[in-house]
Image: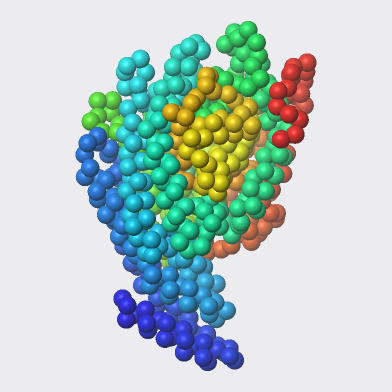
Amino acid sequence: MKKLFYFFLLAVIISSCSGNKPNENANKAVQDSVQTYLDSYNSKYKEVSIIANEAEWASNTHIVEGDSTNAKATNKANEEYAKFTGSKMNIETATAFLTQKDKLTELQVKQLKAILYKAANNPETLEDVVKERIKATTAQTEKLFGFDFKLSGKSVSTNDIDGILATEQDPAKRLKAWESSKEVGKGLKEGLVHLRDLRNKTVQGLGYKDFFEYQVSDYGMTTQEMIDMLQKFNKELYPLFRELHTWTRYELAKKYKAKEVPDLIPAHWLPNRWGQDWSALVEVEGINLDSALKTKDAEWIVKQGERFYVSLGFPELPGSFWDKSDLYPAPVDANYKKNNHASAWHMDYEKDVRSLMSVEPNSEWYETSHHELGHIYYYLSYSNPDVPVLLREGANRAYHEALGSLMGMAAMQKPFMENLDLIPKGTKSDDMKTLLKEALNFVVFIPWSTGTMSMFEHDLYANNLPADQFNKRWWETVAKYQGIAPPSVRGEEYCDAATKTHINDDAAQYYDYALSFVLLFQLHDHIAKNILHQDPHATNYYGNKEVGKFIEDMMYPGASKDWRIALKEQTGSDLSAKAMLDYFAPLMDYLKKENEGRKYTLSEVQ
Ligand code: X8Z
Ligand code: ZN
């Protein structure tokens, strides 16, 4: 390999000598040598990724206490992956070639930049730090997903806990379930402190200030630009969130027969472990998806997701998806545990696509299945000859999250559900209540994602938040953005932030979801108005090939196209919360009336 490197460098030098008067031949020569290098990189990259992905897959689907077989294989495979992607040779070659970027094609420049971006995450120059980080990452995943949640001394799954938080009426039982869900954080704190340091150190090797900056740079943005954008979206949605918050405080105080309406919502009152989605608080008479899904089984949920995509013109999922995915909860008596958070995997950068879920027949998993299949169809779409392996990623990370969430939202609109016979045709229902339920999902998510998660992680990585302040800062942030308080004082022996999957294994990237929600409304608005000619509040995408083509065209180029240009072409505008604001605008007057005479406890401006 060393020899090859000098050959490449020589090619660069020769071509730069003749490069004073650029001509097509000189360009062609440089392009050819760059292409030889890229071809070899792409092929080796695929090879090491497959081994690492297979090992990770085993580590996430089969966690056995005391058995280190999977962890060892995962560490080894990730070390090999790091050795290649972070090698000095790749860093130097890509850097040298980039000095000639004017002579290269856009696709080549993008790939060289992708090589450097990947290298910065595990540079060979910091081999020991990288190795330590790999080990710490694997251990953290095992601890998080191998954890045995207990309720009254009995093992329970996170699905069980979520079920209680969604439906239980007794605040004492809710409190127990909530507290049980936070126990896992205690054992994750040390690992998180260590991982924070290791993540920062690895990316500092190639000049990034910290891991937050590194992750944000994937969007071509600085940390400040990202924070400004997040705060802008949060501010724009804040007046509506403030109404929702006020409405919810009063509703829940009534529901749980509290003597007083609390200023901050007690966390265990909410139907989600982190208060990120409050939609289960509202039931819309006539269109209760949860009760419709009770007659179905878990497999129907995933198959229905596939039917929807196929109806739009996408292919059926490959047989290997069904054979190799791990879609349903581990049996109660299983001697292993599995990652309980939904994910989608692109194993070989070709057609080996898999999903890891714990699907049960309820609306949460119905939405999540559509979300995961969005990732899967994205993988399948950009795995085409026009997109080099290195660029088989979303236009940006938010795009990857948005497309499946868009389909999840579309699959929950009334005309769609009528069409599927999930509800009887011609069902009468209260549209404002539907909008309220949707807002309790999508709008409530904004302060959580732009605020709590992103600002906490910014503090963690960019400001090196001291370890003895993790929980204090977490709950200050939760109060500030979400208007939620813990049921009782949570000292530093807890690490409530670490109960959230992404804090451990998808670090400093949660704003992806915030942006994805904004983007999905922008895309939905375009689809509803310009393709379907339907009211965005009541669409039916099912079976519409034009909608399918619009989505497929968006997915096909992967990361080979600049996301800002693509978005402008697709929707005619830059990323903006306008469509989301328009969608929920009718709710503002309704909530203001509902909240008349009530005390608002969130300040007027965020
Ligand atoms: O983590 C996810 C996906 C991962 S592929 C299931 N989501 C965020 C979360 O659960 O916190 C989807 C939306 C928000
Ligand atoms: Zn996702």
The x and y percentages for residue 563 are 59, 58
Residue at 25% over, 45% down: 70
The x and y percentages for residue 437 are 61, 27
Residue at 45% over, 32% down: 495
Dividing the picture into quadrants, the one containing residue 582 is top right
Dividing the picture into quadrants, the one containing residue 453 is top right
Residue at 54% over, 31% down: 472
Residue at 55% over, 49% down: 462
Closer-to-camera residue (159/121): 121
Q: Quadrant of the N terminus?
A: bottom left
The x and y percentages for residue 500 are 46, 35
Instruction: Say above or below: 254 vs 48.
Output: above
Instruction: Say above or below: 16 vs 538.
Output: below
- From this viewpoint, is residue 338 visible? yes
Closer-to-camera residue (321/392): 392
- From this viewpoint, is residue 159 visible? no
Q: Quadrant of the C terminus?
A: top right
The x and y percentages for residue 127 are 35, 60
Image coloring type: rainbow
Q: How many marks?
A: 0
In screen coordinates, is 251 left or right of 192? Answer: right
Closer-to-camera residue (241/143): 143
